[in-house]
Image: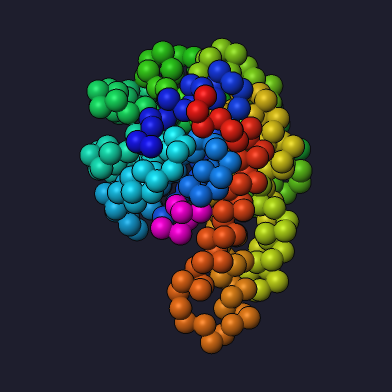
Amino acid sequence: MPIATGIEVLAKAHEGNYAVGAFNFNNLETLQAILEAAEELDAPVIVETSEGAIHYAGAEMLYEMVEVLARKVSIPVVIHLDHGKDFNIIMAALRAGYTSIMIDASSFPFEENVRQTKRVVEIAHAMGVSVEAELGTLKGIEDNVSVDERDATLIHPDQAVTFIQETGIDYLAPAVGTSHGAFKYKGESKIDYERLKEVKRRTGIPLVLHGASGVPASLVEKAEKFGAKLAGAKGVSDEVLKEAVACGINKVNTDTDLRIATVGAIREVLAEHPDEIDPRKILGPARAAMKEVVKRRIGLLGSAGKANL
Ligand code: PH4
Ligand code: ZN
């Protein structure tokens, strides 16, 4: 199928109250794992690259890989720039053909975030590309965090409304208590559901959850068994993720779970077959492990079977 725009798949998810999986990739094996899993589950999917991925492999190469593989599947595939902060990289992604762009100016004061976001929206929309932006700071919330501290980091629903009116973005990433990486929480995983519901009610647009990896114990244990050091790793539980989708999340970002699955599989091959020097025999099991992660995640989000809706 031709590559879809972000808003095409996310508007349907918003109407249907489910979420589309957005998975980060930097290389061929990860992209193959994502697309094979989504195709088997008949699910729309978003493949995304950070600026780091573009520095590693180049926007054109990443885009062309998606183009070649997307042609062979019968599901909608979106190619998205994740956390675009550098205007030159955003332009490189647009020139390469990306169909969805995140402008992340969330570390700037509100007015500057509006200014930078609006500029990118004007350019991207003129090219038929949809835009995501972020409000608040991605930081885990713990039990002992005060209301004032929460207010200092998480999204304010009234600001979200003004932000959307002033910028014209298509979907919004609200900071509601998640964070990137394998060490998200010291205690139980948590999201500020009330804040999330209020943002959804007042904005009425698709919402995005960053830092959503589950960091499943089974993946961590396997990686640790073969030498990885991940003590204290903790992610967003399945229950919390499902509740976040019920509260209005329509795009769920996953990167860390793919990384842990990769590392566990590679470490296992290297530990058990120290004579193995064929990269295909080392990366193949990692690809298979990532595919299982993607299938499980899509199962949690409710997007299986939604490819043609
Ligand atoms: N992301 C992934 C960001 C990856 O620079 P980089 O390639 O390391 O950036 O945007 C997420 O929201 C992933 O969340 P996760 O860590 O919970 O998987
Ligand atoms: Zn993110």
Query: Is 28 part of what is drawn in magenta?
Result: yes
Residue found 66% across the figure and 73% down from its top:
226
Most extreme residue toward the bottom is 275
Q: Nearer the viewer, residue 246 or 91?
A: 246
Q: Nearer the viewer, residue 86 or 55?
A: 55
Q: Is residue 245 left or right of residue 160?
A: right
Q: Most prominent secondary structure in the magenta stretch? A: helix
Q: Does residue 196 lie above or below 61 as drawn?
A: above
Count of marks placed on residues = 0
Q: Is residue 189 left or right of residue 109?
A: right
Residue found 67% across the figure and 38% down from its top:
300
Q: Does residue 221 lie above or below 49 as drawn?
A: below
Q: Nearer the viewer, residue 280 or 241?
A: 280
Q: Does residue 76 lie above or below 11 as drawn?
A: below
Q: Check the image and tell me how it is coloured.
A: rainbow
Q: Quadrant of residue 304?
A: top right
In the image, residue 99 lies at what x, y percent? 34, 34
Q: Does residue 248 lie above or below 106 as drawn?
A: above
Task: Say whether residue 1 is visible.
Answer: yes
Magenta span of residues:
27-33
Quarter of the N terminus within the rendering = top left
Residue found 57% across the figure and 53% down from its top:
291
Query: Is 129 part of what is drawn in magenta?
Result: no
Task: Say whether residue 251 is visible.
Answer: no
In the image, residue 97 lies at what x, y percent? 28, 39
Q: Nearer the viewer, residue 151 or 24?
A: 24
Q: Quadrant of residue 77?
A: top left
In the image, residue 63 lies at what x, y percent? 32, 46
